[in-house]
Image: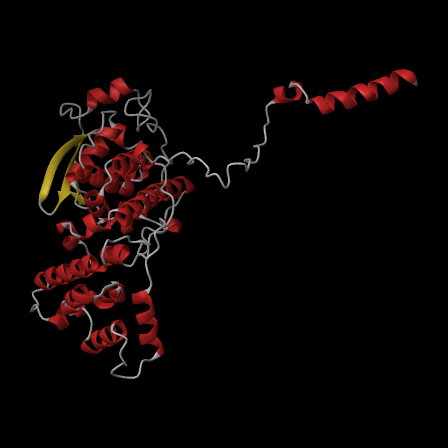
């Protein structure tokens, strides 16, 4: 029995790009015709390898065929090189592994829920199957809302290349051929695009995301990706402060710590400074400060600045920077445009120009159509062309 914990570090085979266009095409992941592969899916009689896949004790048994799977990806090729009849895959959720097998056997993938599509994306990344990663990213983008974005972003940074906190393993130089490195880079780009769109959805639906109970299940790094965003458009900064308080309470319970203000502040760290306290006033400010996310002296400085009183202690440059940031309104414009992954993220057409700019003409796009040379010329061009021809006739 073989247990492989990180096969992508040593895998190297030819990159497989087939099977990308649709659920059912002429060829599938292993390069065999669809009818032949489809008949082999879940075929116990002709199988010569067994996979036991799953995490956290939720493991399932899957029959496989070496001649099909060895040609699908360098990771499967590395796994199947072992002289064993049973391979344990304990680093991929069994739902994701099943969708990976369905794809390689040319069966329609069943990405009906966020959880299944998210697990399939993880499996596609770890097995360097960029066409399946693209399919999962596009399907997840279709289902994006505030709750789905929280579920998708959970630990997604480990699959991304540009997202803050992205994993550095397996490093691209560790892959022994360029095709495997390109597959890994393609998978990371699909994950980057999906994470980008998910964060934009959270910006637009900040209140719904911050009041969702799934927020409390995020790790510190995933929570920081959201609450540190300057473009997080909350209706009230109190919503953000209360969300951080709930997360800190849940973090103390997970780590078996007492629910004291000091322990909550320790769990939040610098995230306690994310709410813009000086945008609140009156009772809302009192409620936000009553959560005790800030140190007592910091709360006193906020109250003094809000009520335009003298500070209880001399204010240094660091404290002054915090006070100014807490009073700065959030931008109303989105951080960026979404990546077009699905009809949901399709860019909208340009709005109608206002009266002030209605007379402005858009610059013409260059045309490389050879028929453009034969188009009818303007009247001025025709006039001068006639004069030139007349002079040529006179002096000929």
Visual colour scheme: secondary structure
**Toward which corner of the image does residue 324 lie, by quadrant?**
bottom left
Q: What residue is at 30 percent from the left and 35 percent from the top?
A: 344
Q: What residue is at 31 percent from the left and 75 percent from the top?
A: 319
In this view, 285 is above or below 26: below
Q: Nearer the viewer, residue 80 or 99?
A: 99
**Does residue 177 appear to the left or right of 63 in the view shown?**
right
The C terminus sits in image quarter: top right
In this view, 218 is above or below 295: above
Where residue 96 sits in the image (x, y, percent)? 20, 38
Visible residue check, residue 82: no
Q: Nearer the viewer, residue 272 or 81?
A: 272
Q: Nearer the viewer, residue 378 or 54?
A: 378
Q: What residue is at 17 percent from the left and 27 percent from the top?
A: 47
Where residue 373 sits in the image (x, y, percent)? 66, 21
Q: How many marks?
A: 0
Q: What residue is at 20 percent from the left and 71 percent from the top?
A: 294
**Does residue 59 appear to the left or right of 16 in the view shown?**
left
Q: Give the residue furthest to the bottom.
A: 313
**Does residue 22 appear to the left or right of 269 in the view shown?**
right
The N terminus sits in image quarter: top left
Q: Nearer the viewer, residue 352 or 369?
A: 352
Visible residue check, residue 160: yes
Q: Give the residue furthest to the front.
A: 355
**Does residue 388 appear to the left or right of 35 in the view shown?**
right
Q: Give the residue furthest to the right.
A: 395
In this view, 242 is above or below 346: below
**Toward which corner of the image does residue 283 lie, by quadrant?**
bottom left
Where residue 27 sits in the image (x, y, percent)? 33, 22
């Amino acid at each position: 029995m073989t247990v492989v914990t990180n096969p992508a570090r040593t895998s190297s085979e030819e990159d497989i790009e087939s099977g990308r266009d649709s659920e059912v095409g002429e060829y599938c992941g292993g390069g065999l015709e669809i009818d032949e592969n489809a008949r082999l899916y879940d075929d116990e009689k002709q199988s010569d390898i067994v996979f036991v896949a799953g995490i956290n004790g939720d493991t399932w048994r899957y029959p496989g065929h070496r001649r099909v799977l060895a040609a699908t990806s360098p990771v499967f090729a590395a796994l199947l090189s072992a002289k064993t009849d049973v391979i344990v895959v304990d680093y991929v959720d069994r739902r994701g592994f099943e969708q990976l097998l369905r794809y390689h056997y040319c069966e329609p993938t069943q990405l009906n829920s966020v959880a299944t599509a998210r697990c399939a994306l993880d499996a596609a990344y770890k097995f360097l199957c960029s066409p399946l990663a693209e399919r999962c990213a596009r399907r997840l983008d279709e289902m994006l809302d505030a709750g789905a974005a929280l579920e998708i972003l959970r630990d997604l940074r480990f699959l991304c290349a540009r997202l803050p906190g992205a994993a550095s393993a397996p490093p691209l130089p560790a892959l022994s051929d360029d095709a495997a490195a390109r597959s890994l880079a393609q998978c990371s780009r699909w994950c980057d695009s999906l994470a980008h769109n998910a964060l934009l959805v959270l910006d637009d639906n900040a209140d719904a995301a911050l009041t969702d109970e799934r927020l409390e299940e995020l790790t510190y790094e995933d929570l920081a990706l959201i609450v540190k965003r300057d473009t997080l458009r909350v209706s009230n900064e109190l919503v953000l402060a209360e969300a951080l308080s709930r997360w800190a309470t849940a973090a103390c319970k997970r780590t078996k710590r007492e629910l004291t203000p000091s322990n909550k502040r320790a769990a939040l760290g610098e995230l306690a400074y994310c709410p813009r306290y000086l945008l609140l006033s009156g009772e809302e400010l009192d409620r936000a400060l009553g959560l005790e996310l800030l140190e007592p002296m910091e709360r006193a400085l906020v109250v003094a600045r809000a009520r335009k009183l003298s500070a209880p202690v001399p204010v240094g440059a660091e404290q002054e920077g915090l006070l100014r940031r807490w009073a700065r309104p959030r931008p109303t414009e989105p951080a960026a445009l979404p990546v077009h992954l699905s009809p949901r993220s399709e860019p909208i057409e340009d709005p109608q120009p206002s009266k002030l700019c209605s007379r402005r003409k858009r610059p013409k796009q260059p045309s490389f159509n050879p028929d453009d040379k034969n188009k009818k010329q303007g009247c001025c061009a025709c006039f001068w062309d006639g004069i030139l021809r007349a002079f040529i006739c006179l002096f000929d």
